[in-house]
Image (spheres, rainbow, N blue to C red):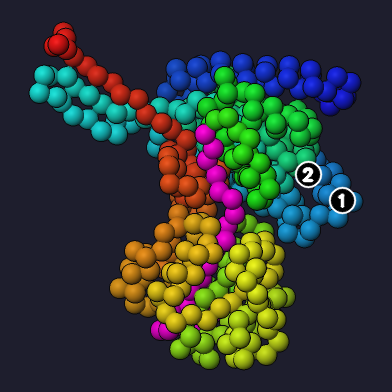
Amino acid sequence: MNSVIEDNKAADIAAVMTSIGEKAREACRDNAGSADGARDRALECAADSLERAAPEILAANEQDVRLARDKSLSPAMLDRLMLDSKRIDAMARGLREVAARPDPLGAVLAEWERPNGLNIQRVSVPLGVIGIVYESRPNVTADAAALCIKSGNAVILRGGSESFHSSQAIHRAIVEGLGAAGLSADTVQLVPTRDRDAVGFLLREMSAYVDVIVPRGGRSLIERVQQDARVPVIGHLEGLCHVYLHDDANTQMAVDIVVNAKMRRTGICGAAETLLVHRQAASRLLPPVVDALTALGCEVRGDEQVQDTVAGVRAADESDWRTEYLDAILSVRCVDGLDAAAEHIERYGSGHTECIVTPDADVAGEFFRKVDSAILLHNASTQFADGGEFGMGAEIGIATGRIHARGPVGAEQLTSYKYLVRGSGQVRQA
């Protein structure tokens, strides 16, 4: 396919993408009438297929990683790209967990009767055809496919060029599962080229086929999608997540949460990027927290009080409060209290995930009321900002907007609704 596109690129990309759109629309109609349990059987079969295909997937991933190293990708990006047997097992487990979730379709969301006898129901239905554009994480291929299958949608996947071979191998396993359950293979389609013009065509020229776009990746990708898409977009620009240590925070808990929030995986959107510490507790909390971070290779950048309290901290500047590092770097600031922490988060945050560490439930409740982000945590790491950890089985991403979906985007968030109105011969009067 790539060689054909190179010969007559613009015409072939248009033809290929249009064909994909037509097949996706047809598959979406077929899925709406699929037999009971067929979508869950497809997910179970796909999980089995993933496990059987593990050697093939790992070999494809080795090829991608080798090419990525040749391009000098950052350690954080390599971590996102690399697969091992545990990550493949996690993908398969995620598919089974999604299958085990309640069916999000056909649920009666509301029901009422009008004085004229009309019965009205609001019932959940698929969104339709979903286009998902993502970068170097090949596991998104499985997660996105699973959620779209479960919610009765058809999906067009366009993975990053770095994960091209890995995504193809995972896609083959998913399609095998669809076939085993009697569902259309076109339910999950993978754009068969790394050419970026295919992304442009998907965003700008396929509104007749695609109902919504979900981007998952870095700021530049998401900005492009939000600017160019001709259909609604569900996504977030960045995960600029905060941890706030209140003055009564338990020292060991503070250390454990901050270290995990920053260092468990630095390259994910739920990783903490800024630590806020109550000024009155700085001398107690900062030394053990910073020592634990630096022992793991984390660079700490702090304001003047942080530098005065702990030796070896680099000076932070205004840009640090606005930076999603996705790396072993943490900016640290002392604040006068909860209100000041909330003001900092409102000014610099991205509306993704924030945490407060305090034993006082009332203080945590005040934090929850004053901070407006998609996910708020009390005494728990920001790395729990994940659909799997929420019990959704998987997620496509974390939405930070306020319309349609917010927080982890799972199968339920990939549904819309329609109204069913039942009468007994009523006609509307003039």
**Which residue occupies 57% across, 34% down?**
213
> Where on the picture, by quarter, is residue 35?
top left
Q: Residue at x 83, y 49 (%)?
A: 68
Instruction: Locate residue 76, reporting x and y percent.
Output: 73, 59
Q: Residue at x 13, y 11 (%)?
A: 429
Q: Residues within 10 Å of mark 2 (few under 14, many from 20)?
A: many
Q: Nearer the viewer, residue 127 or 388?
A: 127
Find disc 1 in the rendering and name its residue. 71
Q: Is residue 120 above or below residue 217?
A: above
Horizontal and vertical percent for residue 422?
22, 16
User: As drawn, is 193 to the left or to the right of 140?
Assistant: right
Q: Position of residue 310 (x, y in %)?
A: 63, 89
> Which of the marked residues, 1 or 2, is nearer the chain's N terminus?
1
Query: Is residue 235 in the magenta section?
Result: yes
Residue 289 seen: yes
- Residue 19: % across, % down: 68, 16
Horizontal side of 429 relative to 181 (left or right) equals left
Name the kind of residue labelled 1 in the image.
Answer: Lys
Circle number at residue 162: 2
Q: Which segment is the magenta one? A: 232-256
Q: Dot 1: within a 10 Å radius of its alpha carbon, few (fewer than 14), some, or many (20 or more) residues?
A: few
Q: Residue at x 26, y 26 (%)?
A: 121
- 419 displayed left or right of 18: left
Confirm or deny contact between disc 1 and disc 2 (CB under 8 A). Answer: yes
Name the foreground residue: 413 vs 41: 413
365 is higher (above) or lower (below) than 26: below
